[in-house]
Image: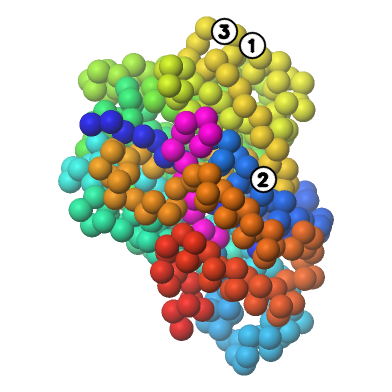
Amino acid sequence: MSAYEVNFDGLVGLTHNYAGLSFGNVASTSNKNAASNPQLAALQGLSKMKALHDMGFVQGILPPQERPCMATLRELGFSGRDEQILAKVAKQAPQLLANVSSASSMWVANAATVSPSADTADNKVHFTVANLNNKFHRSIEATTTRRALQAVFSSAEHFVHHAALPQQALFGDEGAANHNRLCRDYAAPGVELFVYGRQAWGGDVEPQRFPARQTLEASEAVARLHQLNAAQRVFIQQNPAVIDQGVFHNDVIAVSNGPVLFHHQQAFLDQARAFAELEQKLNVLDSPFIPIEVPTELVAVQDAVDSYLFNSQLLTKANGKMLIVVPEESRQNPRVWAYLQQLITSGGPIDEVKVFDLRESMCNGGGPACLRLRVVLNSQELKATNSRCLMNDQRFETLNQWVKKHYRDRLLEADLADPQLLIENRTALDELTQIMGLGSLYPFQRA
């Protein structure tokens, strides 16, 4: 049976702003207090989705969340009408208002970890929503994220949805941003590579400057939930030294597709052992293992962080060769761009580079890979997926018109207290759930 790796990109939310909330993400903190353009951010994301659709790739869409998150503010003791609560929070706890207004759900690489049916014991696609408990503004996403995934992948015959792991540091889980899958082809069984930043029990090597967000214990729990056998999973620790240089997730230093693992020389600890295990397990599955290592002498870690070379998408084209999707920042970095030209002419599996302008997302610390959740689906599973959440020409036009109708083209952190912004958000999302056939997804719709 044929299978596809479908990229589900997150729609940028109406409150997209630069509040600098993500300690450890250099781009996020360095652009704090700048004016954002939510409309442009959403249109840039949609343009990337449409371009990939036009190139023949199956492209999906995931919705943003309701922000400001009034339910969270009420849980934290604020009461009254919505506009009264916003005024109180803006005066008493402005940093809290910034957190509950974040549009960070746009980066759906952190939405969940996904295992395809070819890998799981029950032959179903498994989703575990990420708890994202290292950052408060992201930890409040899990409930709506799970509802959204259930609305897109609703068939119990094909899909299994797991709740987020316990909201405790021991089980810090950042979703697919720290997860890779290697395989001969999408329909074949593969080996899932779980990358963690620290081991909570018994670990002795951790970053010193920035937090390690993913724990080994969380990765092991997800592997158990997804019914992966020991022959189809490998755990490897991210290099703490690169976390301290701003590599807050594995997808800032490595990306996989099919049998290829494109990674920086300094990406992992104990790399030789883990790669030997990967190769042995893939060989059993009749799959090659093709690591492509980028040397530090050609691309320094700082270049990788500045350009988001590895926060890219690797896509298999119809001819079997691969396309790498990078942000404009990769073209603007002379060392990175020189390396990419060398890469695509080397005769290896990657022979084409495609550049996208994603500046609004990049300024907040998210590149092409952050914006998408990879979901491998066979033909039956794709047929069972909510078709109104898949990109086509008409949907692109409809969503572009929706964005232009509802989104502001300038937003500052001070604007988050505006009650009208909440009304605009709810009005837009109510319309979006009808466009995408998502039902009553948001708290304001379920009240």
The kind of secondary structure element at disc 2 is helix
Residue 381 visible somewhere in the drawing = yes
Question: Where is mark 3, residue-wise?
Answer: 346
Badge 3 or badge 2: first in the primary sequence: 2
Question: Where is mark 1, residue-wise?
Answer: 342
Report how far apart the C-alphas of labels 1 and 3 lie in the structure.
Answer: 6 Å
The kind of secondary structure element at disc 1 is helix
Report how far apart the C-alphas of labels 1 and 2 lie in the structure.
Answer: 28 Å
The image shows residue 311, relative to residue 170, as above or below, that is above
Q: Does 113 lie within the magenta span? A: no
Q: Is residue 362 left or right of residue 138?
A: right
The residue positioned 48% from the left and 28% from the top of the image is: 315
Marks 1 and 3 in Cβ contact (< 8 Å):
yes
How many labels, in total? 3
The residue positioned 61% from the left and 22% from the top of the image is: 353
Badge 1 or badge 2: first in the primary sequence: 2
